[in-house]
């Protein structure tokens, strides 16, 4: 296995990747979007063609380009707009619960709860 790949395996945070590749970054952008940046970087790597045939220097340069692209996505946009993770892809990041479902759920909870009796309330006090 190449030294380059071994070095990559030792990296774990977005900051470490950005520093390894010498990408200047704003800490505030990374603090808010670190997982999104890494996920997008992975997506770009997964789509990239011809990486396997590159020597280590060319591979480093190509990986760096893709990381810069992933980072810039979140400098110019935000996580909700970029929709990298499934939670943002589903319904625009919003969950919808209808009023009828809430009513049904409340009715089911009331039916399932043990009936409170005056004597039970006195024992609990």
Image (cartoon, grey):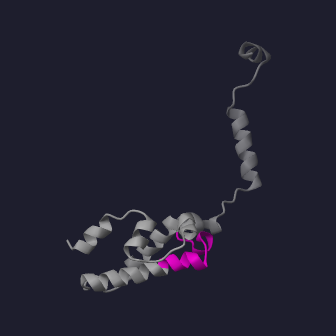
Viewer-side residue, 122 vs 106? 122
Viewer-side residue, 41 vs 86? 41
Viewer-side residue, 101 vs 8? 8
**Quadrant of the image occupied by residue 55:** bottom left
For the N terminus, the quadrant is bottom left
**Quadrant of the image occupied by residue 121:** top right
Q: Is residue 113 above or below residue 100?
A: above
Residue at 27% over, 72% down: 5
For the image, the number of numbered tags is: 0
Q: Is residue 31 magenta?
A: no
**Quadrant of the image occupied by residue 97:** bottom right
The image position of residue 82, as x and y in percent, is: 57, 75
User: What are the residue bounds of the magenta stretch?
Assistant: 70-84
Residue at 70% over, 44% down: 105
Q: Is residue 35 left or right of residue 51?
A: right
Query: Which residue is outermost to the left?
Result: 1
Main SS, magenta region, reads: helix
Query: Which residue is outermost to the right?
Result: 118
Viewer-side residue, 58 vs 19? 19
Q: Is residue 81 magenta?
A: yes
Q: Is residue 6 left or right of residue 77?
A: left
The image position of residue 64, as x and y in percent, is: 39, 80
Q: Is residue 66 left or right of residue 108?
A: left
The image position of residue 60, as x and y in percent, is: 32, 80
Residue at 77% over, 14% down: 122
Residue at 38% over, 62% down: 12
Q: Is residue 63 above or below residue 17?
A: below
The image position of residue 125, as x and y in percent, is: 75, 15
Q: Is residue 111 left or right of residue 77?
A: right
């Amino acid at each position: 296995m190449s030294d380059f790949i071994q070095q990559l395996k030792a990296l774990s945070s977005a900051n470490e990747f950005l520093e390894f590749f010498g990408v200047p970054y704003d800490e505030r952008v990374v603090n808010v979007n670190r997982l999104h940046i890494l996920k997008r970087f992975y997506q770009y790597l997964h789509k990239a063609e011809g990486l396997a045939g590159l020597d280590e220097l060319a591979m480093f340069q190509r990986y760096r380009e893709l990381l810069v692209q992933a980072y810039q996505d979140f400098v110019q946009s935000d996580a909700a707009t970029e929709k990298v993770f499934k939670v943002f892809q589903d319904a625009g990041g919003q969950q919808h619960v209808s009023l009828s479902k809430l009513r049904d759920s409340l009715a089911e909870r009331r039916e399932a709860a043990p009936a409170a009796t005056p004597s039970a309330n006195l024992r609990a006090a």
